[in-house]
């Protein structure tokens, strides 16, 4: 990714100057947290658009709207122990893990399709950028909507930190120095006031500078790191931080059926419970 000597993205390389969002003031006095959100990504709006539920992305959104009240999955051990079934709670917000757009030359058309999808999902939506979202107009729209390439907001008692990850020519992801400094400042100022959701495109444990990022987020009360690179769905551990990688929400030929998934996460002050939902089969993974 082209940079100038001062660390800013080079507009000549079709990238806009980095913009970092303001950090909201954290308050210690708050209500207990009990929040459910959905994570999806790799929608690639602009790739083979179809109207209504003929487009799988809109069919996925319909599943999002209807998941509340459906039974959570139980492990074989829980079923043998006779654990009572629990229902998915009301969906409080949705996060998008990047690659919102297909990355074609017609970015304006892709943004219209993205905004059409946003308007048909009446739930708060938070996003991060992926490598397919790097057209200048796409970045500008994102910064205008969210306040910066990185930003932090409080959503239903959960502190959501959207962290921009860049990729080198070989596709290796890393958090650049400017973003890392912003993250360190935010974590220092917010500390453990809220359960924190780190939203980024690449898996936390696959960043080239993962150790530095893990050190930067250590002051947070980390609940989960949610990502959506193209390696498929996974629930993993990164040096004690729970990680969730969602699958793909497009039907590109290269996306296998096992990768066609999103995820549901329930967060309280004591518990973080993620589960992968396969939108192709309309069932838990």
Image (tube, rainbow, N blue to C red):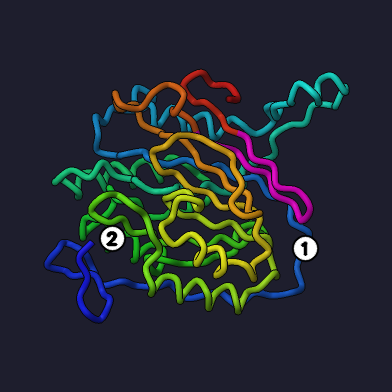
Quarter of the picture containing the C terminus is top right
Q: Do the residues labelled 2 and 1 touch (CB within 8 Å)?
A: no
Name the side, left or right, on which 168 lies relative to 66. left
Residue 214 magenta-highlighted: no
Quarter of the picture containing the N terminus is bottom left
Q: Which residue is drawn at 34% across and 47% down?
A: 115
Q: Residue 31 carries which label?
A: 1
Q: Residue at x 42, y 41 (%)?
A: 41
Estimate how packed mark 1 is, as few (under 14), some (14 to 19) or many (20 or more) residues with alpha carbons within 10 Å.
few
User: Mostly what secondary structure, the magenta segment?
Assistant: strand
Image spot of residue 180 (x, y percent): 45, 71
Residue at the disc numbered 2: 139
Question: Where are the magenta residues, as a range?
Answer: 262-275
Estimate how packed mark 2 is, as few (under 14), some (14 to 19) or many (20 or more) residues with alpha carbons within 10 Å.
many
Disc 2/disc 1 C-alpha distance (Å): 35 Å
Q: Quadrant of residue 273?
A: top right
């Amino acid at each position: 990714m082209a940079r100038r000597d001062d660390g800013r993205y080079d507009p000549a390389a079709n990238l806009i100057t980095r913009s970092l969002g303001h950090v909201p003031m954290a308050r210690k006095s708050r209500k207990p947290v009990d929040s459910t959100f959905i994570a999806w990504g790799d929608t690639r709006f602009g790739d083979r658009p179809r109207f209504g539920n003929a487009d799988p992305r809109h069919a996925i959104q319909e599943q999002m709207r209807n998941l509340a009240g459906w039974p959570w999955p139980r492990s074989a051990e829980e079923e043998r122990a006779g654990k009572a079934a629990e229902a998915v709670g009301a969906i409080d917000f949705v996060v998008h893990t990047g690659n919102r757009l297909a990355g074609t030359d017609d970015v304006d058309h892709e943004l219209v399709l993205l905004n059409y999808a946003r308007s048909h999902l009446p739930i708060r939506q938070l996003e991060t950028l992926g490598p397919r979202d790097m057209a200048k107009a796409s970045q500008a729209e994102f910064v205008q909507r969210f306040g910066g390439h990185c930003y932090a907001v409080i959503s239903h008692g959960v502190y959501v930190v959207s962290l921009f990850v860049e990729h080198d020519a070989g596709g290796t992801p890393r958090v650049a120095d400017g973003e890392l400094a912003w993250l360190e400042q935010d974590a220092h100022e917010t500390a453990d006031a809220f359960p924190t959701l780190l939203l980024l495109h690449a898996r936390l444990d696959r960043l080239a500078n993962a150790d530095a990022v893990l050190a930067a987020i250590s002051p947070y009360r980390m609940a989960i790191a949610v990502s959506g690179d193209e390696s498929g769905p996974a629930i993993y551990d990164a040096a004690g931080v729970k990680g969730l990688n969602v699958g793909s929400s497009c039907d590109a030929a290269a996306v296998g059926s096992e990768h066609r998934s999103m995820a549901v996460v329930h967060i309280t002050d004591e518990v973080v419970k993620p589960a992968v939902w396969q939108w192709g089969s309309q069932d838990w993974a």
